[in-house]
Amino acid sequence: MNDNAMQKSAMSPAMPWILAAVILIVLPFIFTGGGSITIMNQIGITIVLAMSYNMLLGQGGMLSFGHAVYMGIGGFVAVHVMNLVENEYMWLPLPFLPLVGGLVGLGFATIIGSFSTRKAGTVFAMISLGIGELIAACCIIITVFFLVVKKEFLEIEQWLLQPLVLSLSLKKKFIF
């Protein structure tokens, strides 16, 4: 086989990937609106989620009902880190927020995967379904918990800010 044929055969599998990379680099310069950037961002996130499911079911042969849990946990933490950055409680450049979410999702996937991937087939599917349902229930519980705690904290804060004379509040009426 001559050198020209070897270069051609070695280059052809990489060409679609190079072309896709060039298109992805050029698209944000063509579509500069905020909405189109957001849509492209969501498309990228969905592609990563679909690739993870393909790795689980396609190459690994494991049917997972909870593979989106790790993406959800990572997104949840990334939003809270973004709020911390916005309120200046911590410093982090905005482009690193997806990295924070990805690393948190990786951490939870490592912990949960350490026991759930020991089994295959129906057992793995049921464990992943159970983890997904557990996280869904925790989302409801955590939301309600923080709403109650925030309400009680505000009531305590208002009580502490009231002027007191001889340990009696001047804003409340006492009936004896």
Image: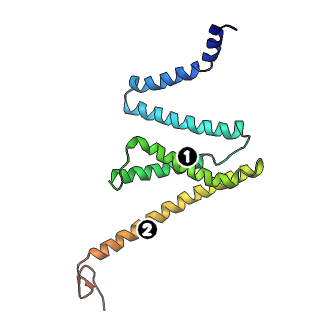
Give the residue at x 37% y 44%: 93
Give the alpha-carbon distance from disc 2 to disc 1, as whole Å.
Answer: 27 Å
For this view, does 47 lie left or right of residue 24?
Answer: right
Front residue of 135/170: it is 135
Residue 107 visible: yes
For badge 1, the amino acid type reads: Met
Residue at 41% x, 27% y is 28
Secondary structure of the residue carrying numbered label 2: helix
Q: Are marks 2 and 1 in contact (CB under 8 Å)?
A: no
Above or below: residue 117 compared with residue 29: below
Residue 127: horizontal and vertical position, in percent? 70, 54
Q: Is residue 141 above or below residue 78?
A: below
Position of the C terminus by quadrant: bottom left
The residue furthest bottom is 176
User: Which residue is drawn at the image coordinates 64% and 9% (left, top)?
Assistant: 3
The answer to whether one can see residue 129 in this image is no
Q: Position of residue 104 (x, y in %)?
A: 52, 50
What residue appears at the point 43 percent right and 53 percent down from the top-left corner? 80
Q: Is residue 141 left or right of residue 159?
A: right
Residue tagged by mark 1?
A: 71
Helix, strand or loop under label 1: helix
